[in-house]
Image (cartoon, coloured by chain):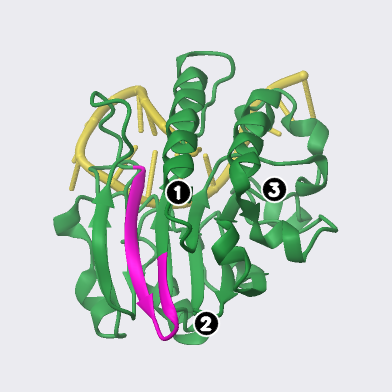
Amino acid sequence: MKIATWNVNSIKARLEPALAWLKAADPDVVALQEIKTVDEGFPREAFESLGYNCTVHGQKSYNGVAILSKRPVEDVTPRLHGDDADDHARYLEAVITGDHGTVRVASIYAPNGNPFPGPKFDYKLAWLERLRRHAQKLLADEEPVVLMGDYNIIPEDKDADRPKAWLKDALFQPQSKAALRRIENLGYTDAYRALHPEGGHYTFWDYFGSWERNNGIRIDHLLLSPQALDRLTKAGIDKEVRGASEKPSDHVPVWVELSI
DNA sequence: ATGGTAGGCGTCCTA
């Protein structure tokens, strides 16, 4: 089963390149982030025509996550526990049935956290702690789990073309890196890192000319539970998507293949 | 060291 994550930066603005990528890459499951629309505005018919079930947790103007699946979807759960006042649409979970078992997947859009320091950074850390607690609970079931999305965290120096340029940025603060490591320390594995440890591979380039200079960062991650890691066969970044359309997202898709 | 772009239904905010 091929499982991908992609921050599209508005699903309406990205509909044509998204359909083209789906046809070429043919993933079974796709976690989308920053769809920037309410549920009613999601162009589900276009994806259904390619054979995908659409599960949407939308929000007006900002954030918003979704899960597309060619396989049966059940046990759909939006939102993270721990803060009833948090109305950002940043988390959506579902169970997907494959040919050889099931996998629980989550589409994650972690807060950006800039400017640092400040209340937005505090919100980022609090949100990531809520994610950690939830990730911990999921391990008790000892099932394959894939927590994927835009974590807005650069894990290490080798995940940025110019690490020094990010020293004052929320994405590269020691507390942000520690929050990601705490989730990994529960027993989750960064799938792309596990198969491509060398660094220098990026998933995001800003719109300020960074693509042309390959001034990128790796901030979109798929974290695998031990049972998912056991089934991991491949991981990749579809970098070519950035150059394949006139109006690309600032992120590109990242994917894994699991024998499920 | 700075500021550059993109998207959204609001004249700025978020990224």
Choose between A205 and A141: the one closer to the eye. Answer: A141
Where A101 sits versus A139, above or below?
A: below
Which residue is at a point 47% across and 43% down the rendered structure image? Answer: A135
Per the rendered image, the range of residues in magenta is: A90-103
Choose between A43 and A259: the one closer to the eye. Answer: A259
Name the residue at the top extreme.
Answer: A118
Residue linked to disc 3: A217
Q: Nearer the viewer, mark 3 or mark 1?
A: 1
N-terminal label among 3 and 1:
1
Q: Is residue A216 left or right of residue B11?
A: right
Residues under labels 2 and 1: Cα distance?
33 Å
Residue A109: image location, x then y, percent? 44, 45
Q: Which chain is green?
A: A
Q: Do the residues under discs 3 and 2 have CB atoms within 8 angstroms? A: no
Residue linked to disc 1: A140
Q: Which mark is residue A100?
A: none
The amino acid type of the residue labelled 2 equals Ala
Residue A184: image location, x then y, percent? 63, 44
Where A84 sits versus A251, above or below?
A: above
Secondary structure mostly seen in magenta is strand
Residue A40: image location, x then y, percent? 14, 57
Name the residue at the right extreme.
Answer: A198
Choose between A186 and A196: the one closer to the eye. Answer: A186
Which residue is at a point 34% across and 54% down the rendered structure image? Answer: A93
Residue linked to disc 2: A25
